[in-house]
């Protein structure tokens, strides 16, 4: 019997989280206290969750990322979770 497979076609995003003292009013500039990057995207989150499940399914991610550091990081994080990223295309940016 063949092992179960899950193919996820979806987004792979670099979430940028800014910590601020308060939400800015219209037209106000607020300086961030900190900046944090996190891998996200509905597709990537689903692939990560499926790979981490205890069901032992093979997970293949289909999507695209940039060739920048964020794209490299997000692909590496998926790979380290056990996701097959051969379906992730790298798209050069400007």
Image (cartoon, rainbow, N blue to C red):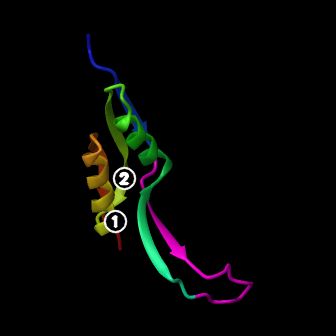
Q: Position of residue 60 (x, y in %)?
A: 32, 36
Looking at the rendered structure, which numbered label has been put on residue 64? Answer: 2
Quarter location, residue 81? top left
- Image quarter hosting the N terminus: top left
Circles 1 and 2, Cβ within 8 Å, touching? The answer is no
Compute the Cα span from label 1 to label 2.
12 Å
- Foreground pick, 12 / 66: 12
Q: Quadrant of residue 38?
A: bottom left
- Residue plotted at (35% across, 57% down): 65
Q: Secondary structure at mark 1?
A: helix
Which residue lies at the image location 38% right of the left edge and 29% below the top edge?
Answer: 6
In the figure, is residue 83 to the left or right of 8? left
- Check disc 2: other Cα within 10 Å, few if <14, some if 14-19, many if 20+: some
Quadrant for the C terminus in the image: bottom left
Q: Nearer the viewer, mark 1 or mark 2?
A: 1
Instruction: From the viewer's perspective, tell me whether residue 33 is left or right of residue 90.
Output: right
Closer to us: 56 or 72: 56
Residue 9's x, y, as percent?
Answer: 43, 40
Q: Work out whether 2 lies above or below 11.
A: above
Q: What range is drawn magenta here? A: 10-30
Identify whether 3 is placed above or below 84.
above
Per the image, label 2 sits on a secondary structure element best described as strand
Q: Is residue 65 visible?
A: yes
Residue position marked by numbered label 1 in the rendering: 70
**Is residue 22 found inside the magenta-colored segment of the image?**
yes
Disc 1 or 2, which lies upstream in sequence?
A: 2
């Amino acid at each position: 019997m063949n092992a179960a497979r899950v193919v996820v076609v979806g987004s792979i995003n670099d979430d940028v989280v800014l910590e601020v003292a308060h939400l800015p009013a219209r037209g106000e500039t607020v300086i961030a206290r900190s900046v944090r990057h996190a891998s996200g995207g509905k597709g990537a989150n689903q692939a990560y969750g499926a790979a981490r499940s205890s069901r032992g399914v093979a997970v293949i991610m289909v999507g695209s990322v940039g060739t920048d550091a964020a794209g490299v990081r997000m692909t590496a994080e998926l790979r380290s979770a056990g996701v097959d990223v051969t379906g992730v295309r790298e798209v050069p940016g400007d």
